[in-house]
Image: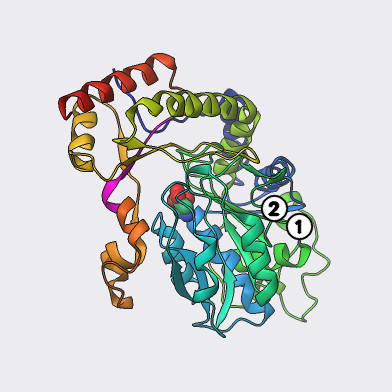
Amino acid sequence: MKVPFGTIHITKKSKEIINKILDSERVSSGKYVAEFEQKFAKLAGAKEAVALSSGTDADALALAVLYDYGAKRNDEIIIPALSFVATGTAVLQAGFIPAFVDIERDTLNINPEKIEKKITKKTKAIMPVHLMGKPAEMDKIMEIAKKYDLHVIEDAAEAHGAEYKGKKIGTIGDMGAYSLYIAHIITTIEGGIVITDKKEMAEILRSLRFHGRACKCKQCVINTKDSYCKLRFKYNTDIRFVFERIGFSCKMNEIEAAVGLGSLEHYEEILKKRRFNFFYLKENFKKFAPYLMTIKVEEYEKIGPHAFPIILGEKTKFKRDELVKYLEDNEVDTRNLFTSIPTQTPAFGFMGYKSGDFPEAEYIGNNGLHIGIHQDLNKEHLDYVIDLIEKFIINYT
Ligand SMILES: Cc1ncc(COP(=O)(O)O)c(C=O)c1O
């Protein structure tokens, strides 16, 4: 039985909109992107949403907003040592230096107790990651941010639908950055989006996504309505050629937005199915301790399940890659549970960290994997995986 990691359906509604877009010949960012932004913002519980080409851009642009608030190039951003590599690269792409903090093994998220030690005069923000859709400990993070006057940008790439103490993830810090890549709950195929309640930050994001252009309007009347823009010559030259900040080129296009609009319509049922799958596996994994574990879930949080993380216990006699090969040979798709960005990612070698600096992140880098729990997987798929793993473990005990 095949158990794929991710799935995608382009809905009937999306296909109808895509055909209209193709006939209209307005395919670059326009009214459907604006509609998607408005609907995503509502769903995510924020006033504004700015759609982009990827989750990595969402992280990088949210960080680049900080230049308008006094940040300087080479200032520092606190991030967890374990995440998908994009969290680290986005910091560098935005012109900042990542300051890494180790994670906790049973949450996979930044260890709040270790943050303060990494704060320097150059620190401008904390960027917690809600890995696998499990919320980071936001109360503690917000308290530290307040104490040191830091911004908080949530990397919510994997956390669609997650909640922390009654608050929606992505709305607790200044901005929340999501990925809309295929494996995620809401998808535009490729894509990302930043949410915020702060109007000024949304305006800066809109400028940044278009090369830093002086345009900041929520809906561009030229692009969405084909009408006259009253601000067009406010600088005595065409505003579209006035660039106020060092920007990026990462707009979402209309076709991607159409896929997203269809995806939004099935959001509740997708989330429900993924939550069922996550807890079904979690319950059935109890019997695999102390060989295999997963993350803990607190009463005060709601997971927005991205995938199912599996962590090998310290005394387990098999290696992660043996289990991975066995699962793959039996048609179960797997992914490693990322690497310690500073110490296990060759691209970050130039920063000079050494093995052992982030023991928990490194442990997961060597002993973690994750498998799909998406909406197209049913109980039969999950039972198949559980059976497979049971047989594997029996072999080693
Ligand atoms: C935690 C995290 N941050 C950022 C990203 C980057 O998103 P994208 O692949 O859309 O660029 C991902 C990718 O899934 C991610 O898992």
Question: Can you give x and y, in whole percent of width and height, for residue 235 in the image?
Answer: 77, 80
Look at the image and say whether residue 329 sits in the magenta stretch: no
The answer to whether 174 appears left or right of 344 in the picture is: right
Other-residue count near label 1 (Cα within 10 Å), few / some / many at <14 / 14–19 / ≥20: some
Label 2 CB-ligand 1 distance < 8 A: no
- In the picture shown, does residue 67 fall above or below 34? below
User: In the rendering, which numbered label is found on residue 197?
Assistant: 1
Asked where in the image residue 183 lies, by quadrant, the reply is top left
- Locate residue 361 relative to residue 226 in the image: left or right: left
The stretch of residues the image draws in magenta is: 365-372
Q: Residue furthest top?
A: 380
Residue 140 in sight from this viewpoint: yes
Callout 2–callout 1 Cβ contact below 8 Å: yes
Q: Looking at the rendering, in which quadrant would you find the C terminus?
A: top left
Disc 2, SS: loop
> Considering the numbered disc 1 on the image, is that residue within a helix, a strand or a loop?
loop
Is 379 placed above or below 19 here? Answer: above
Q: Amino acid at mark 1?
A: Asp
Disc number placed over residue 171 in the picture, else none: 2
Determine whether the beta carbon of the residue marked 1 sits less than 8 angstroms from the nearest atom of ligand 1.
no
**Residue at x 74%, y 50% (from the top left corner):** 46
Q: Amino acid at mark 2?
A: Thr
Distance, label 2 to label 1, CA atoms, is: 7 Å
Where residue 115 appears, x then y in whole percent? 53, 69
Tell me which residue sits at (23%, 36%) in the image: 324
Q: Count neighbours of disc 2 (C-alpha within 10 A) and say few if under 14, some if 14 to 19, many if 20 or more.
A: many
**Residue shown at 54% from the left, 77% from the top:** 119
Q: Earlier in the sequence, mark 2 or mark 1?
A: 2
Count every numbered label the image shows and give the total: 2
